[in-house]
Image: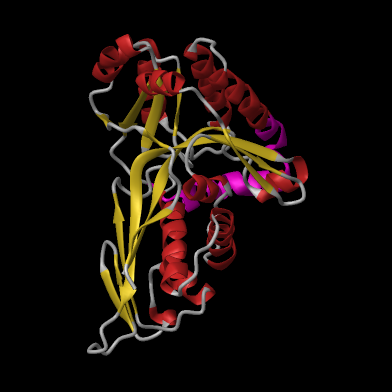
C-alpha cells in the first residue's frame, strides 16, 4: 500500500495569469502558500478474488473492468497516462470540501500521480509530478485550469511562481522569518461561504476573454501585484500593506468574469471591510467556496460577528509539498 498526501493551497496574488492563454503571450506570475489541510490518496493492489480490475473510492465507489469504464476523470486519465491496466484500488480523502477554491482537484491529481508512480516502483521529482498533473488536467481531462495549483501542491510552502512566454515554470520559495509567518497567520481569516461551485463553469467566460486578448490589461496588472506582494511579505512593512494588495487584486479579479462574484459575496466583502478587514479575496475561480480576509488580529472578532452566515475555519501554514507518508510493498 502507498499513501500520498498533497496540501491544499491559498492563492494570494496573480491568479488568472497562470493560464497559457495569457502567459505564452505576456508571461505570468503567482504568489501562493499551502496550508495544513490535505488531499490524501491511497493506492494498493486488488485482491485476486474479485471480478473487476479497478476499484475507486471517493464520494461514491466504482468497480470497473477497464480504464475506459472509470467515471472519475482524474483517476481514469492518470491510470491511462501511466499505462496501468488493472489490479489497483484507489481511495480519496479530503480534509475540506472539494470545489471550494483551495485547489483540491489538482492536489488530488498530484497525490494520485505520485502514489501511482510509487506503486510501479518509481520515485519522481516534484517538478515532474506537477508537470504531469498539468498535462492530465488540461490535455487529457480538458479542464479549464491554470498551472499554479499543481505546482503549489507538489512543492508546498510560500511560493513565487513565474510562467514564461516559452512555457517554462520557475518555482521559487519565498523565504520568510518565522515571526513574520506567525504574524501573517494571526492576520488571516478563512471563512467558508457554505456553497460549492464547479471551476470549469466559472472559468469558461474568463478563459475565452483571455484567449481573445480582451483581458490582457487586467491580467498584466494582476501579474504586477505579485512582485509587490513578495516584497511586502519579505520586508518589515506593516501587513496592512499586503492586505491592501489583496484588496487591489480582488477589485481587478472580480472584473475578469461576470461569474466570479455576486451580490451576496460582494455584500459579505463590504461588511468585512466595514468591520475592519483591510483586504481579501474569494479563493480559486470564484463563485463561492472560501473567503480569505486579512485584518488586524484585534478586529477578527468584529469581522466574524459581521458575517454570521459564514463559518470560520482554522488552519496553519504548511511548508511541505506532496509526499509519500506510507509505503509498504
In the picture, measured across the screen, residue 54 lies left or right of residue 164, that is: left
In the picture, measured across the screen, residue 40 lies left or right of residue 220, that is: left
Say if 176 sits above or below 299 in the image.
below
Say if 191 sits above or below 27 in the image.
above
Residue at 31%, 42% (x, y): give it.
195
Question: Where is residue 13, by image quadrant?
Answer: top right
Residue at 73%, 45% (x, y): give it.
164
Question: Where is residue 17, by image quadrant?
Answer: top right
Question: Where is residue 172, by image quadrant?
Answer: top right
Which quarter of the image is occupied by the C terminus? bottom left
In the picture, measured across the screen, residue 113 lies left or right of residue 327, that is: right
Q: Is residue 131 magenta?
A: no
User: Measured from the top left, where is residue 175 in percent x and y?
Assistant: 55, 29
Q: Is residue 73 visible?
A: no
Magenta stretch bounds: 197-220
Q: Main secondary structure of the magenta part?
A: helix
Amino acid at each position: 500500500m502507498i499513501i500520498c498526501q498533497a496540501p491544499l493551497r491559498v492563492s494570494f496574488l496573480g491568479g488568472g495569469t497562470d493560464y497559457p492563454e495569457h502567459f505564452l503571450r505576456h508571461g505570468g506570475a503567482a504568489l501562493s502558500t499551502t496550508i495544513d489541510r490535505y488531499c490524501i490518496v491511497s493506492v494498493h493492489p486488488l485482491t485476486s478474488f474479485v471480478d473487476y480490475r479497478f476499484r475507486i473510492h471517493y464520494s461514491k465507489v466504482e468497480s470497473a473492468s477497464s480504464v475506459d469504464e472509470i467515471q472519475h476523470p482524474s483517476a481514469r486519465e492518470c491510470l491511462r497516462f501511466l499505462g496501468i491496466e488493472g489490479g489497483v484500488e484507489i481511495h480519496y480523502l479530503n480534509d475540506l470540501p472539494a470545489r471550494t477554491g483551495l485547489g483540491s482537484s489538482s492536489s488530488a491529481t498530484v497525490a494520485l500521480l505520485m502514489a501511482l508512480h510509487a506503486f510501479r516502483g518509481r520515485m519522481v521529482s516534484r517538478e515532474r509530478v506537477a508537470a504531469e498533473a498539468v498535462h492530465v488536467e488540461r490535455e487529457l481531462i480538458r479542464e479549464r485550469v491554470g498551472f499554479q495549483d499543481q505546482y503549489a501542491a507538489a512543492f508546498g510552502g510560500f511560493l513565487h511562481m513565474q510562467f514564461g512566454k516559452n512555457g517554462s515554470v520557475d518555482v521559487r520559495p519565498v523565504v520568510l522569518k518565522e515571526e513574520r509567518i506567525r504574524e501573517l497567520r494571526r492576520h488571516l481569516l478563512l471563512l467558508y461561504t457554505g456553497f460549492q461551485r464547479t471551476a470549469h463553469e466559472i472559468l469558461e467566460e474568463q478563459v475565452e476573454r483571455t484567449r481573445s486578448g480582451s483581458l490582457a490589461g487586467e491580467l498584466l496588472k494582476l501579474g504586477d501585484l505579485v512582485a509587490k506582494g513578495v516584497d511586502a511579505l519579505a520586508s518589515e512593512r506593516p501587513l496592512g500593506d499586503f492586505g491592501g494588495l489583496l484588496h487591489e487584486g480582488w477589485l481587478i479579479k472580480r472584473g475578469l468574469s461576470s461569474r466570479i462574484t455576486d451580490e451576496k459575496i460582494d455584500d459579505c466583502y463590504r461588511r468585512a471591510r466595514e468591520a475592519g478587514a483591510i483586504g481579501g479575496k474569494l479563493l480559486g475561480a470564484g463563485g463561492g467556496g472560501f473567503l480569505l480576509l486579512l485584518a488586524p488580529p484585534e478586529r477578527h472578532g468584529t469581522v466574524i460577528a459581521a458575517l454570521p452566515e459564514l463559518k470560520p475555519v482554522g488552519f496553519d501554514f504548511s511548508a511541505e509539498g506532496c509526499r509519500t507518508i506510507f509505503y509498504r510493498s
